[in-house]
Amino acid sequence: KRFLLTLYGQLTVRLPRVVCQCGGSIPIPFTLLRRWQRVWQDVRMQVQDWARRRMSLREMQEDLAKMLETSMGLRTLNEYVHTSSRLQIGERQLSTVPPVVALDGIWMTQLTAKDVERMDKMGRKRQVKRKKRRVILVALGIWPRTGRYKILDWELADGESRACWDQFLARLIQRQLWHSRGLRLFIHDGGSGLKASLKRWYWEIPSQRCVFHKLRNVYRAIVVPDDSTYRQRRALRRQLIRQTAAVFQAPNLEQAKLVLTDFKEMWEEEQPEAVETLLRDLDDTLRFHTFLQANPSWRPETLRTTSFLERINRMLRRVFREAGAYHSSTGLNAAVERVLLPLLVL
């Protein structure tokens, strides 16, 4: 006799026990129940749905107690929340390859154990943990003709160095993210580690520097007079940023170069750092004009910035902000999967 807990109540299931002529029991795998299984899949799915809604384990425990008139342990609920299919995702070949791929990383905090132990209030030995900044590397596929976008892959890494990006891009190549399958352009924020890794693994694919990140860098490079008022500083920054944005809002590459010439003549002496920041990697930042000219049906907003990927990042940041910090990589990967899995390309 076995007892199976479901959302409809507790079921009593009788399974046959096979005994050999010698008297020993013979283990037989059943498709209905696994060994030691006491909870049906609908309960696990309900717990994971509550986790997507960011309910605490104790709130889940209370709701299940009301629904099922029985209690489930917090450790069991935590295991259900951390259930992940991440390994299967990274091993699959991409079913389709988009023309444009945006790459970025989002930082968060994870607690890692040290070799030092201390006694807690209950007299138990606990390992001392410290905060460590880690990053989720994300690849987002974009179809610029329709504006559709899907998650291709992601990975938990210790940073955005070349070595970390090398490992991530190597897996994308193994999953057949190739030029021969339709890949034409990468969009990124211009990080040195990512640029070096792209040059190694995807030397034949051009890159588009995110216009928004370029404008942000120009804004930070603006030098305002010390004796100016708040309104004067704001007006100066607004004027310069609007003129910088006009370079990228030009209808074509020739017009953009004309606007850039006027910008340089006006600000080169007064704001040399801002002008130098704008000119850095300018060819990569204006590359979207070349693709728009070759593909008139493509939408400009899908090529100029990583804004589509920033939407995904905001969803992750909301989860990270509520959690504060994660105690394990397993819990962190499960939280990321709950956000990104519905957007994964099939």
Image: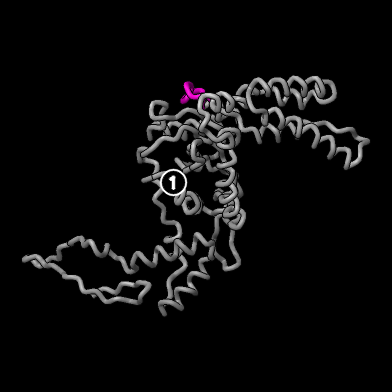
Across and down, in percent, residue 280 comes to 68, 23
Question: Is 235 on the left or on the right of 322, as rendered?
Answer: right
Q: Quadrant of the C terminus?
A: top left
Dot 1: few (<14), some (14–19), or many (≥20) neighbours within 10 Å?
A: some
Determine whether 157 is above or below 285 in the image: below
State the image quarter where residue 72 is shown: bottom left
Give the extent of the magenta segment.
Answer: 198-206
Residue at left offset 93%, top offset 36%: 227
Question: Between residues 46 and 35, which one lies in front from this camera angle?
Answer: 46
Across and down, in percent, residue 340 comes to 48, 49
Question: Is 13 on the left or on the right of 100, as rendered?
Answer: left
Question: Between residues 340 and 150, which one lies in front from this camera angle?
Answer: 150
Question: Between residues 322 and 8, which one lies in front from this camera angle?
Answer: 8
Q: Secondary structure at mark 1?
A: loop
The residue labelled by disc 1 is: 344
Residue at left offset 59%, top offset 41%: 307
